[in-house]
Image: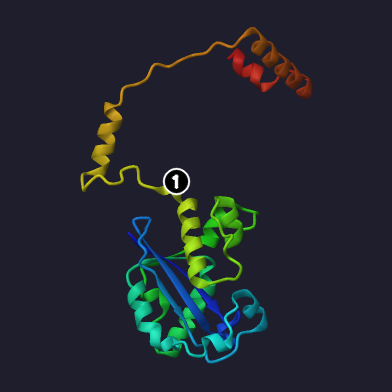
Amino acid sequence: MRQIVLDTETTGLNPRSGDRVIEVGCVELVDRRLTGNNFHAYINPERDSEPGALEVHGLTTEFLSDKPKFGEICDALRDYLRGAEVIIHNAPFDVGFLDAEFSRLSVPPFGQHVVGVIDTLVRAKEIHPGKRNSLDALCDRYGVSNAHRTLHGALLDAELLAEVYLSMTRGQNSLAMDLGGEDEEAVIGADLQAMPLREIIVLAPSEDELAQHEAVLSSLDKEVKGVSLWRTLVAN
């Protein structure tokens, strides 16, 4: 499976008010492995960045003045993305900006060039409800070093997000990877049937452990002012 982790930097927060894409960074994963086949471009937005956005990415108008315009990198970006599943943190933001850029060029919207979009912010909120789920917070949570990240950069953020995504979804790896085209279900079933059952080892509690257990049950009896559920289960 080919996946692309994508990030953008922009002149501001709202493409409808004329804000533009100024950087695109993409990292390729094939079968959950980084390939090194990345895509990166700085873009001349033909306007200044908002002060707040400039503080985040540090890409000045002067630096971007000799960079290609979006129309000059559009075809290369679409060719790179075509047919891939794309992974984005807070996807509506980046997709909204890219759709606006495509629309200016009378190009079909983002969704028509890719096979699907995974929003890691949505995934993170499902896995870690009620917690901070920014990219920095996820890097801390999954042990991905971002010590070298002083300013936001599209390629750097895409690389960090790729590591976070792989960590966040590690449990989804197939049980039958690298089987060389064999019938995976048959192989898994055969392995399970051939595996001998191990001897079940039963460890009897010591007298001290039994005494501690009885003390816990007695405290539960006192809490419910009667016989606790655990004693009922033991009696049955």
| Quadrant containing the C terminus in the rendered view | top right
The residue at 51%/69% (across/down) is: 91
Residue under label 1: 171
Q: Nearer the viewer, residue 78 or 142?
A: 142
The residue at 39%/88% (across/down) is 72
Q: Relative to 215, is 167 above or below? A: below
Residue at x 55% of width, y 51% of height = 142
Which quadrant of the figure has residue 136?
bottom right
- Residue 139 visible at all: yes
Residue 7 rendering spot, x and y as whole percentages: 49, 71
Q: Nearer the viewer, residue 202 or 36?
A: 36
Give above or below for 184 relative to 23: above
**Pointer 1 local density, CA inside 10 Å: few below 14, some 14–19, many at least 20:** few
Q: Residue furthest top?
A: 207
Its colouring scheme is: rainbow
Label 1: element kind: helix
The picture places residue 116, in percent across and down from the top left corner, at 40, 66
The answer to whether residue 18 is visible is no
Is 20 on the left or on the right of 130, as rendered? left
Q: Nearer the viewer, residue 53 or 230?
A: 53
Give the x, y percent position of residue 213: 67, 16
Q: Quadrant of residue 12?
A: bottom right
